[in-house]
Image: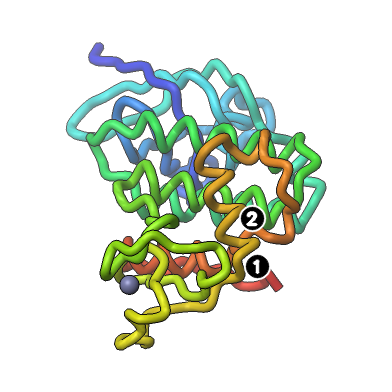
Amino acid sequence: MPSLTTQAIVLRHADYREHDRMLTLLSPSMGRLEALCRGCKRPQSPLLSASEWFAMGEYVFYSGKGHLTVTACNLTETFFPLRTDYERLKYATYLLSIAEAAAQPGDRAVELFTLLARSLGRLAYGKQDERAVAAAFLLHFSAVSGYRPRLHHCVHCGKKLEDAEICLFDLENGGLTCPSCLENRLHTRPVRPEQVLWMRDVLRQGIDKTALPDHDAPGPLLAEYVENRMEKPIRRDGLWR
Ligand SMILES: [Zn+2]
């Protein structure tokens, strides 16, 4: 029987027949994949927890006729506290949507998987503001996706930027713009110097180590930047209000 095993996180599920679910998962070695989870909606099913949103573990699939079916799961994490905090749940769900939009079937996604697992852990168990955790995810996501923003030099003329003159972020070109290069204001957004320092510090040493305040995390800007680069708008109703 052809079977395969991989670590995975459930990105979403859809009801399928009376007792089954179709899962969308993110695997570090296989990217995004779809798998049928038979009988998981029965109360006694050993796969019930493994078919929930955010479930993470080692999944075993039967592969036949081009379709995957979950046959077993060694669950390692459910990020359960997310289910008791609606605010944190909203941001966690947004991160799943970004991961689903970015991951491709069959493409390795080791960095994305690690980033998602860590960010969900921070949202479930950490004390940091959920808006800052989500902003840090987006910032690192842009870096692992190949469009790390340029935060030290003007994206147009290359001039080194002094902290005091930093004022605009160019969404199309992926970084800061100096005051002399403002001919195209359509795709620029204002950004405070404190927000630039936050992004630089979080990219350098991670959100766990930064001493800069959570309220300087430019969440909406980074969400717009990432979604613009992916060319996929992601629903974020009620986020960053
Ligand atoms: Zn310039």
| Residue contact at pointers 2 and 1, CB within 8 angstroms | yes
Report the residue that reaches farthest toward the left.
Answer: 65
The CA span between labels 2 and 1 is 7 Å
Q: Which of 56 and 178 is in front in this view?
A: 178
The disc labelled 1 sits on which kind of residue? Leu
Q: Nearer the viewer, residue 47 or 197?
A: 197
Rendered position, 82 above or below 195: above
The residue that label 1 is drawn on is 239
Q: How crowded is mark 1: few (under 14 residues within 10 Å), some or many (20 or more)?
A: some
What secondary structure is found at the residue carrying circle 1? Answer: loop
Residue pictured at 44% horizontal, 57% vertical: 151
The residue that label 2 is drawn on is 91
Q: Position of residue 63 (x, y in %)?
A: 26, 24
The quarter of the rendered structure image containing the N terminus is: top left
Labelled disc at residue 28: none
**Where does ligand 1 appear, by image quarter?**
bottom left
Q: How crowded is mark 2: few (under 14 residues within 10 Å), some or many (20 or more)?
A: many
Residue pictured at 46% horizontal, 66% vertical: 234
Q: Where is residue 17 in the image (x, y as percent from the top left)?
A: 46, 48
189 lies left or right of 89: left
